[in-house]
Image (cartoon, rainbow, N blue to C red):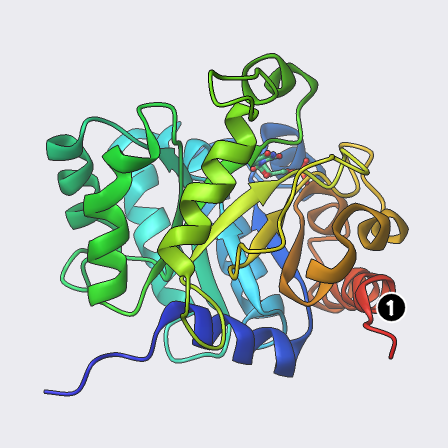
Amino acid sequence: MTSPERFGARLRAAMDTLGPLCVGIDPHPSLLAAWGLSDDVKGLEAFSRTVGEALADRVAVIKPQSAFFERFGSRGIAVLESTIRQFSGTRTLVVLDVKRGDIGSTAAAYADAYLDPASPLCADAITVSPYLGVGSLRPIIDKAAANGLGAFVLALTSNPEGAAVQRAVGASGKTVAQTVIDEISQVNAGVMPLGDVGVVIGATLGQHGHDLTNLNGPILAPGLGAQGGRADGLRAAFGDQAPDVLPSYSREVLGAGPGIATLRAAAERARDECAAALAVTA
Ligand SMILES: O=c1ccn([C@@H]2O[C@H](COP(=O)(O)O)[C@@H](O)[C@H]2O)c(=O)[nH]1
């Protein structure tokens, strides 16, 4: 049996062909209202289907935010399952934003839920939290690698409250975030063309002062638009790692709906701004 193509390689190909952009599916109650939809499962379903119709095969990555689906219980989860399925067979990869993490034996169950192709919630990658120790994520990292899937580990989040924990300095003299980055760098060492395990670094942070040189993995950068991050700040924030940066917008792009054409136009504008900001000059 041949091994599945690795997540890092698939992400690199998607970003090369469709551009460096992730759009979040965050069906906030205020967005449902602005789109003329009801704040219930029917509205959730219509919202997610419209985003799929507008952006499948047009953006490299789509990132459903699980919380907005969980809000509606099992029927919301059923919509999340069909939202993920909408993108299968397209070039658009799905990163499910669930920020999971637990002791290793429970992390293994999360891996079964989200990174096993037999599961209805299986995505191309998930977001995970390292605050039980990066080592506790090993079952998730291993399951992802075995199935050609990936994970993004929180390092420096886009919200201002994150700094108190993530910039705290440990006994090694490194910040918590740098320790996370360095442990993930080891996981990705030698993987070509790009490792399967990324980190999350907020696009709101500007020059964050952390060393990403050896990461060899994708950098998911949320916080653009609604949280104040700007595409023209990406280059200064990420320097030589620019080619590995996956900028992410949710509300800013979703606010252009419910029209298919207006959603596409907003995503294209965001993609072009990010691509220009991240362009590697010789
Ligand atoms: O550091 C982080 C990690 C995750 N997020 C998530 O991304 C989107 C951002 O939505 P916007 O509407 O573009 O603000 C949301 O789902 C967050 O939970 C983040 O913002 N920062």
* Residue depicted at x 19% and y 26%: 103
Q: Taking 193 as reference, is 34 left or right?
A: right
Image coordinates for residue 51, horizontal then vertical, percent: 58, 59
Please give the residue where the numbered disc 1 appears in the rendered image. Answer: 276
Q: Where is residue 111 in the image (x, y as percent from the top left)?
A: 20, 47
Q: In this view, does 188 lie above or below 114?
A: below
The secondary element bearing badge 1 is classed as: helix
* Residue 193 position within the rendered picture, expressed as x and y whole percent measured from the top left: 49, 77
Q: Image check: 104 left or right of 242?
A: left
Residue shown at 62%/68% (left/top)?
Answer: 54
Residue for point 41% across, 42% down: 183
The percent coordinates of residue 100 (x first, y second) are 33, 34
- Asked if residue 157 is positioned above or below residue 55 in the image, the reply reads above
Depth check, front residue: 91 or 168: 168
Work out whether 212 lies above or below 164.
Answer: below
Residue 5, quarter of the rendered image: bottom left
* Residue 96 seen: no
Report the number of discs: 1
Whether residue 198 is visible here, answered yes or no, is yes
Q: Which residue lies furthest to the front in this view?
A: 172
Quick check: which quadrant has ligand 1?
top right
**Which amino acid is tagged 1?**
Ala
The crowding category of the residue bearing disc 1, from other C-alpha atoms within 10 Å (few below 14, some 14 to 19, many at least 20), is some
Q: Quadrant of the C terminus?
A: bottom right
